[in-house]
Image (cartoon, grey):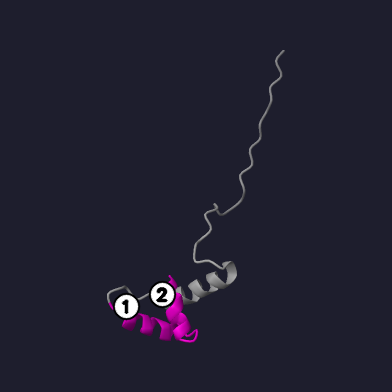
Amino acid sequence: MTDMHFVYGMALGKARRARRLYGQQFPQRPTPNVHTFINIHAQLCETGSFKRSTGVPGRPVTATTIQIEEV
């Protein structure tokens, strides 16, 4: 992903230009969609990392423990 972000910077933030440059620089690799360049840049700006969070998305799980009284 770092190479995609680097090319996006070389293209001055233009996703279509970045896609074309990436295809020229790395012809042996599949060329990513223009939205991939935009999303990678946005994620890096928001989180400071290329890694996705490992947490489970969604509502937190709550557990209720019932104590039974012995008679």
Whether residue 26 appears in magenta in the rendering, the answer is yes
Of 46 and 65, nearer the camera is 46
Q: Quadrant of the N terminus?
A: bottom left
Q: Identify residue type, mark 2.
A: Asp
Percent x, y of residue 46 = 59, 70
Q: Which residue is mark 2?
A: 3
Q: Identify residue type, mark 1.
A: Phe
Q: Which residue is mark 1?
A: 26
SS for callout 1: loop
Of 68 and 4, nearer the camera is 4
**Is residue 19 placed above or below 2 in the rendered structure?**
below
Percent x, y of residue 65 = 66, 31
Please give the name of the residue rendered at 32% of the width and 83% of the height, measured from the top-left corner. 24
Other residues around mark 2 within 10 Å, as few (<14) / some (14–19) / many (≥20): few
Q: CA distance from mark 2 to mark 1?
A: 10 Å
Judged by its main secondary structure, the magenta piece is helix
Of 10 and 71, nearer the camera is 10
> Which tag, 2 or 1, sits closer to the chain's start?
2
* Residue furthest to the left: 28
Residue 51 numbered mark, or none: none
Of 4 and 58, nearer the camera is 4
**Is residue 56 placed above or below 18 in the rendered structure?**
above
Whether residue 53 appears in magenta in the rendering, the answer is no
Percent x, y of residue 38 = 49, 76
Q: Residues at badges 2 and 1 in contact (C-beta under 8 Å)?
A: yes
SS for callout 2: helix
Residue 26 placement: quadrant:
bottom left
Part of the protein shown in magenta: 1-27
